[in-house]
Image (spheres, coloured by chain):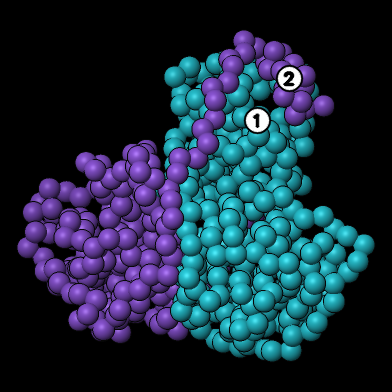
Chain colours: A purple, B cyan
């Protein structure tokens, strides 16, 4: 079985971004970029399915500028067999990404698409579900366990208040949550090998997709900060303050 | 043109986050309808009809909607979407699962996790773990929106009751099947709506020690939360995770115990009214957002607090 893993290049998770002075966006100059953490989990899951002999091929795909190829190399160092780079600069809305991925799904006909539940820049949490809808496939979002049995994907999902298990006919879309696995680190020989793995270059035009936008960002601002509070010396003082000063305890 | 709110419910009870979504919907248009899709959920529809500002409740009561699978509900929503200027749901795991599917088939963008309604087509939403707020304007004919419910107060319930209209449309599909679910049966309040939240981090050290925190929570009638570090360490289930990729809470009082305060955790709780941090590391970043900080050994402080309350 063939697995497609869409990934995204984002600001590294350890960086606290700053709003640009002109309030048009965030300042991304000279900021460390990485593969979105949920995408790493998606790559890891696909590679494990290949190691178990369930998957035969793992293809990474990304939509982005020139430099997004770095993250495709990372995915291949982690075990993806080949990748597809869809060249498109600037911010691309989730629906446009889903349409581009739909075109790739139609071309590659994967049995399973595994992707992160959200990217930590836009925090939209949309692409997987949109792709599933466009491809008329079932979806197992926020997965913490994935089993392939009798031609179906059995997906255990994180839901508010607990867990849910769904059984999906393949081909299907799965989006990853944190507990699904712990991604490995790429080893040096694998990083070297990844340099030789093929990256296919595509464009939205070649895929027959018009990249549209219907959301206009009017401004980006800093949220109201919290002013520094006070330190208390003991549990007794804390309770006293909460009762009489903050009045949040009776 | 009216706006539609998708009710969050368990077939038996209506989740109060629905009242927060109705608040946001009412800021877009005064004519708010609520869709209750499920099975044996008449009581839920009756509860939704009591919310002020709701003019109609659509009740799709059929066994096919029992588990509210997105593959099924999408078809139902597409059948009625033409009547609405906006479709809204809570930014819960249910709303997040369903609405992007609907948006994609309507060929419109989804606006995720809004915290403010500026006008009928302009909304404010957090990006980058809440480190920035984006004001976005939508040019789509139908706005598909998930709502961060901690940012909107639940609307009041009134005397008058809205009309409940049955929806007979039945959508069937066999690509996705419900297998089972395991929902926590805790007596404690739900994280999303609790007035007080007591959260623990890696500082607790073990799943057993988390019980110390639970005792304090029970004394306060509080919900229990956790940092990602505590979830990753296996102390508690992921459904208790507060943060960028977990639950976003904004209680009256948030007590962070043994939590260092990573950006991703702060994203989930920094809109709380009063924040208390208890940590033995005076340099922990959590103290920068705390109204009251206590540098101390949590194993000593937790029993003390419990005794004082």
Residue A195 position (above or below residue B128): below
Q: Which residue is mark 1?
A: B274
Number of numbered callouts drawn: 2
Residue B259 position (above or below residue B165): above
The part of the image, by quadrant, that contains residue B96 is: bottom right
Residue lying furthest right in this view?
Answer: B159
Q: Are marks 1 and 2 on the same chain?
A: no
Residues under labels 1 and 2: Cα distance?
A: 11 Å
Whether residue A155 is visible to the viewer of this picture, yes or no, is no
Q: Which residue is mark 2?
A: A245
Residue at screen point 59% across, 16% down: A230
Q: Position of residue B118 (x, y in %)?
A: 58, 55
Neighbour tally class for label 1: few under 14, some 14-19, many 20 plus, Cα within 10 Å: many
The part of the image, by quadrant, that contains residue B131 is: top left
Q: Position of residue B101 (x, y in %)?
A: 50, 75
Residue at screen point 14% across, 72% down: A200
Residue at screen point 61% across, 44% down: B249
Q: Chain of mark 2?
A: A
Q: Position of residue B11 (x, y in %)?
A: 75, 70
**Mark identifier at residue A174:** none
Residue at screen point 78% across, 75% down: B57
Q: Chain of mark 1?
A: B
Front in this rendered view, residue A49 or A170: A170
The part of the image, by quadrant, that contains residue B71 is: bottom right
Q: Position of residue B46 (x, y in %)?
A: 85, 70
Helix, strand or loop at mark 1: strand
């Amino acid at each position: 079985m063939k697995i497609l893993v869409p990934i995204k290049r984002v600001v590294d998770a350890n960086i606290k971004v700053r709003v640009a002075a002109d309030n048009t966006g965030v300042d991304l100059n000279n900021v460390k970029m990485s593969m979105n953490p949920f995408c790493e989990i998606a790559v890891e899951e696909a590679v494990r399915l290949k190691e178990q002999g369930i998957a035969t091929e793992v293809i990474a795909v990304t939509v982005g500028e020139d430099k997004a190829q770095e993250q495709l190399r990372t995915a291949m160092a982690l075990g993806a067999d080949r990748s597809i780079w869809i060249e498109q600069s600037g911010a691309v809305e989730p629906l446009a990404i889903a349409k581009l991925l739909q075109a790739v799904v139609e071309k590659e006909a994967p049995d399973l698409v595994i992707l992160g539940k959200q990217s930590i820049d836009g925090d939209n949490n949309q692409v997987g579900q949109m792709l599933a809808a466009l491809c008329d496939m079932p979806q197992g979002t926020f997965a913490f366990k994935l089993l392939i049995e009798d031609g179906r994907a059995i997906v255990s999902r994180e839901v508010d208040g607990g867990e849910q298990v769904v059984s999906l006919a393949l081909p299907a879309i799965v989006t990853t949550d944190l507990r699904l696995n712990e991604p490995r680190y790429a080893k040096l020989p694998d990083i070297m090998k990844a340099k030789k793995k093929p990256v296919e270059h595509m464009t939205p035009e070649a895929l027959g997709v018009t990249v549209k936008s219907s959301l206009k960002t009017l401004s980006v601002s800093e949220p109201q900060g919290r002013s520094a509070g006070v330190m208390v010396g003991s549990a007794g003082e804390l309770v006293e303050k909460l009762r009489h000063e903050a009045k949040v305890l009776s | 043109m009216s706006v539609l709110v998708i009710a969050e419910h368990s077939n038996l009870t209506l989740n109060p986050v629905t009242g927060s979504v109705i608040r946001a919907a009412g800021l877009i248009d005064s004519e708010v309808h609520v869709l209750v899709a499920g099975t044996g959920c008449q009581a839920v529809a009756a509860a939704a009809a009591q919310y002020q500002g709701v003019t109609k409740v659509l009740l799709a009561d059929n066994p096919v909607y029992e588990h509210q699978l997105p593959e099924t509900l999408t078809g139902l929503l597409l059948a009625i979407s033409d009547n609405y200027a906006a479709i809204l749901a809570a930014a819960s795991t249910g709303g997040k699962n369903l609405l992007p599917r609907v948006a994609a088939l309507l060929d419109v963008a989804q606006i995720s996790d809004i915290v403010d309604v500026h006008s009928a087509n302009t909304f404010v939403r957090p990006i980058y773990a809440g480190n920035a707020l984006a004001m976005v304007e939508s040019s789509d004919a139908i706005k598909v929106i998930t709502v961060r419910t901690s940012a909107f107060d639940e609307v009041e319930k009134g005397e008058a009751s809205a009309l409940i209209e049955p929806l007979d449309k039945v959508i069937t599909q066999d690509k996705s099947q419900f297998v089972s679910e395991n929902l926590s049966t805790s007596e404690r309040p739900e994280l999303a709506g609790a007035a007080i939240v007591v959260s623990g981090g890696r500082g607790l050290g073990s799943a057993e020690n988390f019980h110390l925190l639970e005792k304090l929570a029970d004394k306060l009638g509080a919900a229990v939360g956790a940092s990602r570090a505590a979830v990753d360490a296996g102390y508690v289930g992921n459904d208790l995770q507060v943060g960028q990729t977990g639950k976003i809470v904004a209680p009256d009082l948030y007590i962070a115990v043994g939590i260092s305060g990573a950006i991703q955790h702060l994203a989930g709780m920094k809109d709380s009214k009063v924040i208390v941090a208890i940590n033995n590391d005076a340099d922990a970043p959590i103290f920068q957002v705390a109204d009251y900080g206590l540098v101390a050994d949590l194993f000593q402080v937790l029993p003390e607090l419990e005794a004082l309350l």
